[in-house]
Image: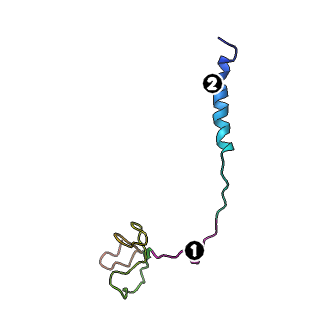
């Protein structure tokens, strides 16, 4: 048994703790404004009925611009279920 054998676990831990700090990527957040969004996925509670039947939104969370499946709406839009 060599003298270095007891140091191996310590060396392993030191390397494991040092690597995450060396592998960092840069992060530059971008500023969002109302013009940053180009699709409407939430129906506002004050929105009027759409001109084209079923065209409440321009995109959906389920299929993106395919605009199918489920939509989100603000509380109060669905007068039949006002707490949703």
Does the magenta run of residues contain 41? no
State left or right for residue 23 relative to residue 57: right
Give percent across and percent down for residue 4.
69, 18
Residue 27 vertical position relative to residue 75 in the rendered view, above or below: above
Quadrant in the picture for the N terminus: top right
Residue 28 vertical position relative to residue 37 in the rendered view, above or below: above
Q: Say which quarter of the image contains residue 63.
A: bottom left
Point out the tag, 2 or 1, that comes first from the N-terminus: 2
Q: Say which quarter of the image contains residue 64.
A: bottom left
Prevalent SS, magenta region: loop
Give percent across and percent down for residue 12.
64, 29
Give percent across and percent down for residue 45.
41, 80
Q: Residue at x 66, y 26 (%)?
A: 10
Q: Secondary structure at mark 1?
A: helix
- Residue identified by numbered label 1: 36
Residue 11 vertical position relative to residue 50 in the rendered view, above or below: above
Toward the top, the furthest residue is: 1
Quadrant in the picture for the C terminus: bottom left
> Which mark is drawn over residue 11?
none
Q: Residue at x 31, y 75 (%)?
A: 81
The residue segment tinted magenta is 30-40
- Residue identified by numbered label 2: 9
Q: Residue at x 58, y 78 (%)?
A: 35
Q: Residue at x 48, y 75 (%)?
A: 39
Give percent across and percent down for residue 69.
34, 69
State left or right for residue 7 relative to residue 35: right
Alpha-carbon span between mark 2 and mark 1: 50 Å
């Amino acid at each position: 048994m060599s003298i270095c054998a007891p140091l191996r676990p310590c060396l392993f831990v030191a390397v494991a703790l040092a690597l995450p700090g060396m592998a960092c990527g840069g992060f530059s957040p971008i500023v969002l404004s109302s013009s940053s969004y180009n699709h409407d996925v939430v129906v506002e509670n004050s929105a009027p009925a759409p001109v084209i039947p079923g065209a409440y939104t321009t995109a959906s969370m389920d299929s993106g611009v395919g605009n199918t499946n489920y939509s989100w709406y603000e509380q109060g839009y669905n007068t039949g279920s006002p707490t949703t």
